[in-house]
Image (cartoon, grey):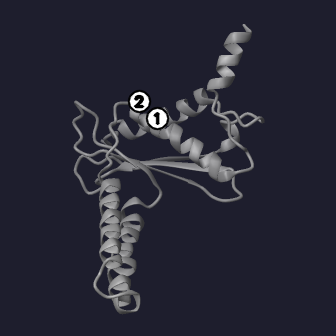
Amino acid sequence: MQEKKAETTKNAKKVNLLDHNSLKHMLDESVSEIVTSRGYVEDVRMSNVKLFLGTVIIVIALFAQFYNKKFPGNRDFLIGCIYIVFNVIIQLISYTKEKNAIMFTYPPAGSVTSTGLVVSSKLLRFSDLYTLNIGSADPKSISAGKPVEFTKSVTHWFTKDGVLVEGLFWKDVEALIDDYAAEPKKKK
């Protein structure tokens, strides 16, 4: 009996309840785990593009380091290429495409839809209300479903010791995924 309790305690996801960043991170990680367990494969193309742009920035910085001119002479080159152009591109990608997204997915195997999911969340500072939103990765697609969301207090899913009650959270997130995947009712 004691061994099972020790195993459960060791595997429990515990977080500091006073740190909203830790709370959101824990919930977001659990959402990612739930979505992937439902057959959705994570789409990491956006992250790969940002990593590629970061690599280009590093290569340009190395080129500028060993450029024929010394620092005051190559200052305009550094400012123009690295700090302005590429960082603005990365920020635009984050601002326009990612927004509050936790993850992007491909459609599940064998699905009739041609779009994956965009899973996003919000937990405002000094608030206990966690909002989870599931929408289509391509909202203009014919097979895109209506976005669904729920807003609940994080106190529903955490004990007073800061342990995540995964069963309750999984049930809520799976219900939201099912709501998104459900066929829309046709009105007669």
Q: Estimate how packed mark 1 is, as few (under 14), some (14 to 19) or many (20 or more) residues with alpha carbons within 10 Å.
A: few
Where residue 138 appears, as percent x and y from the top left, is: 28, 54
In the displayed structure image, the side of residue 93 where residue 172 appears, left or right: right
Where residue 134 appears, as percent x and y from the top left, is: 43, 47
Type of amino acid at the residue the image marks with label 1:
Glu
Residue under the image location 42 percent in, 67 percent down: 95
In the displayed structure image, the side of residue 94 where residue 167 appears, left or right: right
Q: On residue 126, which mark appears?
A: none
In the picture, the quarter occupied by the N terminus is top right
Q: Estimate how packed mark 2 is, as few (under 14), some (14 to 19) or many (20 or more) residues with alpha carbons within 10 Å.
A: few
Mark 1: secondary structure: helix
Q: Nearer the viewer, residue 62 or 129?
A: 62
Q: Are marks 1 and 2 in contact (CB under 8 Å)?
A: yes
User: Can you identify the residue that label 2 sits on?
Assistant: 37
- Up-down relation of residue 38 to residue 4 (above or below): below
Where residue 140 appears, as percent x and y from the top left, is: 26, 57
Residue under the image location 73 percent in, 33 percent down: 159
Q: Nearer the viewer, residue 57 or 68?
A: 68
Mark 2: secondary structure: helix
Residue under the image location 32 percent in, 80 percent down: 81
Q: Quadrant of residue 162 in the image?
A: top right
Q: Nearer the viewer, residue 64 or 34?
A: 64
Q: CA distance from mark 1 to mark 2?
A: 6 Å
Type of amino acid at the residue the image marks with label 2:
Ser
